Amino acid sequence: MPQISFEYVDNIDDEPKKRDPKEFKPKTETASSKIPGVRKKEKSPPIDLDAERIDLKGKNEYVKFCGITSVKRTPLFASNKRLHYLLELTNNLDFIATSILGGDLDKMLLKSANGDTEKCQFFEKNNIIYILYGKFPDKKGKWVLEEMAKYFSDLVRGKDVNNLSKLDKFDIEKKFKGHLLFIFKEYKQLEDVFSDQEIPYIEDWIRVDYVGLSSMSIGVISVLLDREGKLNVKVPGEFEDPAEEIEMKESLLTAKIEAIAANTLGNTGAYPRWIAVKLGFQQYRFLTFKKYRNDYFLSCLSEGNLKKIEKVEAKLEPILHHGMNTKFSGNLRPFNKLKATIKDLVDKIPGRKFT
């Protein structure tokens, strides 16, 4: 606020002298312009939830989307309507996480055609899933999601979120938008409190339970390696031949995995490099994808230390090399031979654990 100079009058009983209003000139100089070394404090630009991205720390940390959906697939909030499809994608991911992988949906890393990566981070509370999409450290993302959940839980206390009236929806969205702006302002002020240091994985191995290869969303190889039932894959009906049951499970897994990959790639223009499902403290299962030439994608279901997945992919790549030399023509025969080779490779690894 501009400062105004007043003349000091020593005797309060004396009537102040009349002044020409022109003499009342606001000061235009500040400490930053007069004293060397004093920096002018720059105001942060206002946060616009409808913008394509919200910069939180220069260009290194930003958010593109905040969303809320119920586990029963009821959309509850979307900060950016252009990315509304992430709510449905989250529900699809949550279904695989809680059913087949037996854990809680935690994170997804998206990789674009030019190699850029962005992240979706998730948090579930009281059958409501909170989503944050952009680029930010895990700990900061977790803080934002927990703050979102805390306030939204208060807003919907005593209400059935799957049957809200239009008036309730409007009122809740209006109040939540206001609080979301507050959360991001707090994020900027508290950013130095958070440590970006990663917590190491408990395991020093990664166990492979499934390997798949696809082209243009068509599964060409599907190998279920899990014989202990660690993956909760259920198929309808009874089977006299165990091989037939395994084949049905492989088909089911392939269909669900390819649907996730195609849905993500079609909507975001990026493919999921990995999707993490939390089993316990620093214990995870992963669905990973790696893109190869001629539009082939290698997918793996695994558990353990994600940093080891590249070793698994490096072992599998020579087996798949010749099959990926040409675009898929619809002929599965060459790939059927590779399926047996993959099984032989993994069976030679004790417990299927790559270190």
Image (cartoon, helix red, strand yellow):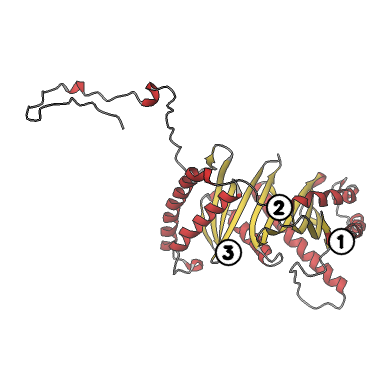
Residue at the image point whose x is 46% and y is 58% from the top: 151
Q: Nearer the viewer, mark 2 or mark 1?
A: 1
Label disc, if present, on residue 274 of the rendered structure: 2
Q: Which of 156 and 85 is in front in this view?
A: 156
Under mark 2, the amino acid is Trp
Residue 18 drawn at (x, y percent)? 11, 23
Query: Would you call the spot at circle 2 few (<14 residues within 10 Å), some (14-19), or many (20 or more)?
Result: many
Total numbered labels placed on residues in the image? 3
Q: Is residue 27 above or below residue 262?
A: above
Query: Would you call the spot at circle 3 few (<14 residues within 10 Å), some (14-19), or many (20 or more)?
Result: some
Label disc, if present, on residue 73 of the rendered structure: 3
Residue 52 drawn at (x, y percent)? 54, 43
Can residue 220 be seen here? The reply is no
Between discs 1 and 3, the one toward the N terminus: 3
Q: Nearer the viewer, residue 222 or 188?
A: 188
Q: Which of marks 2 and 3 is in front?
A: 2
Residue where numbered disc 1 is placed: 350
Under mark 1, the amino acid is Pro
